[in-house]
Amino acid sequence: MLNPYFLQGSSQEQNLVQSLINEQLRMYGVDVHYLPRKYVNEKTIIREVSQSKFDDAYPIEAYVDSFDGYGDNPTLLSKFGIQATNEITLIISKERFESYISPLIKNETNIKLSTRPKEGDLIYFPLGDRLFEIKYVEHEKPFYQLQKNYVYELKCELFRYEGEVIDTGIDEIDDTLEPIDGVDGSTILIGPSLRLNLAGEPSRATATVSVVNGGIQFFTISNRGSGYTYAPKIGIGSAPSGGVTGIATATLIGGIVVCTNSANPGSKSVQNINVVNAGSGYTVAPTIKVSGGGGTGAAATAVIENGVIGIVTVTSGGSGYTTTPTITFTGVSTVSAAATAILTSSGTISAIHLTNAGAGYTQAPTITIAEPTSLSTGNFQFNEVITGSRSGATARVRSWNASENILDVYEVTGTFVTNENVVGSTSSASHAIRSVNDYPVDDGYVDNQEFELEADAILDFSEINPFGQP
């Protein structure tokens, strides 16, 4: 039986020790932020967390026990590749946590444990501008001095981002998700993301045309060929002395296996040959040669005429185009010209190719390009929620490149569709989607696209029948 004449941990003694510890932490510690993990979705089988978020951050003083620098995880080579995970040990006051942070989070329904720091929560370490994940909480060291414990020792590892929402309202913490510049000048995004190519604010494109004699009016395809995996080159016979040799480009079409008897149903045939430059000075139709593209058999002939449109020069690419605009030519002619526009991923017109250069023009016609139909406006804000106007899909903004109209998002729910507008919940910015790229942005280290290409070379399930023809 203990001696009753000696105190064995009175509340006064315990309070004195706790006060001394709190004072030392405030003198020799650093201000960190504690981010409790909130569980948004859990799987029902083994309670695996499929979605979580960090939207609160509480400042608290902590002593850096790793005084000699970051510790390194001894695992250098694992099934996930080479790893060198930084570790840090922090000590915080038990009383400060229980009297300051616990009351603020105890009524949160999606927080599992509020009475002490828990594994899986985050610590923002300002000296290195890094987020660390708590891997283990030691709450019995020092071991019951005066019959009580006074600190929590947090064993932390550098946080590996896996799609969690980080939106604390503190810029120094939230900007962890913003893109960083790589050593080669490229932009690196941390964690999975989805890239949306959007249409910019609408503005009509403009172009000018010229008229020439003895130019190529159009091409007639006599054989579509087969087996093309990319557009072949179109070789045009040289114009006579003093003339200009024409330039053309080919477009492909797929899904006509029955007609072409292609061994690879995923390959394509020549759909059209469009005029880029009609040339001039031709007195007889030039010869046409189709080469490259991985296929064979395509053949075409050229039709020449006087008073054709020689070349179309885009003077302003415009912006905000989500679909190919209508192009009209106004002028006196025997055959009116027709053309198609080539759109970039940012919704501007890069070139105009003639499907028919017309005939009988005595002076340059007026070319008119239809206005874009999108109603794009505004700039998105980092970490705001965007919503698809038709699909109802949602995501959070990772980065917004207004000059190239590229929006990188994360925490995607649902499926975005092309030509719908995405609207920002905070900025009210609204832009139409031109295309969706679900490949992660290449940061110089990931090899997913290379693996996919190599796998397709073995067995390509994008083909109609990868095991052979029906």
Image (tube, rainbow, N blue to C red):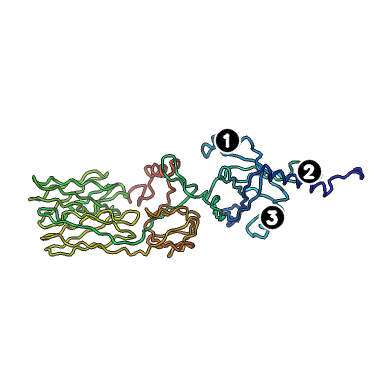
Give how far across and how far down residue 241 sits, in percent: 8, 45
Q: CA distance from mark 2 to mark 3?
A: 22 Å
Q: Earlier in the sequence, mark 1 or mark 2?
A: 1
Q: Are the residues tagged 1 and 2 within 8 Å (C-beta)?
A: no
C-alpha span from label 1 to label 2: 34 Å
Closest to the camera, between mark 1 and mark 2, is 2
- The answer to whether the residues at label 2 and label 3 have Cβ atoms under 8 Å apart is no
Residue 369 left/right relative to 142: left
Which residue occupies 67% across, 42% down?
28
SS at mark 1?
loop
Image disc number at residue 144:
2
Q: Secondary structure at mark 3?
A: helix
Image spot of residue 166 (x, y percent)? 55, 53
* Any part of residue 45 in sight: no
Q: Amino acid at mark 3?
A: Ser
Left or right of residue 225, residue 200 in this image: right
- Type of amino acid at the residue the image marks with label 2: Tyr
Rendered residue at 60%/36% (across/down): 69
Residue where numbered disc 3 is placed = 102
Looking at the picture, tell me which residue is in the foreground, 235 or 399. Answer: 399
Look at discs 3 and 1 and give the one toward the viewer.
3
Position of residue 375 measured from the top left corner of the image (x, y, whole percent): 37, 65
Q: Which residue is mark 1?
A: 75
**Residue at 28%, 50% in the rendered image:** 268
Left or right: residue 145 compared with residue 34? right
Q: Residues within 10 Å of mark 3 (few under 14, many from 20)?
A: some
Q: Give the residue drawn at x 63%, y 46%.
A: 134
Mark 2: give few (<14), some (14-19) or many (20+) Cα within 10 Å: few
Q: Amino acid at mark 1?
A: Thr
Q: Indicate the quadrant where residue 317 lies.
A: bottom left
For marks 2 and 3 on the same chain, the one whose residue lies earlier in the sequence: 3
Element at badge 2? loop
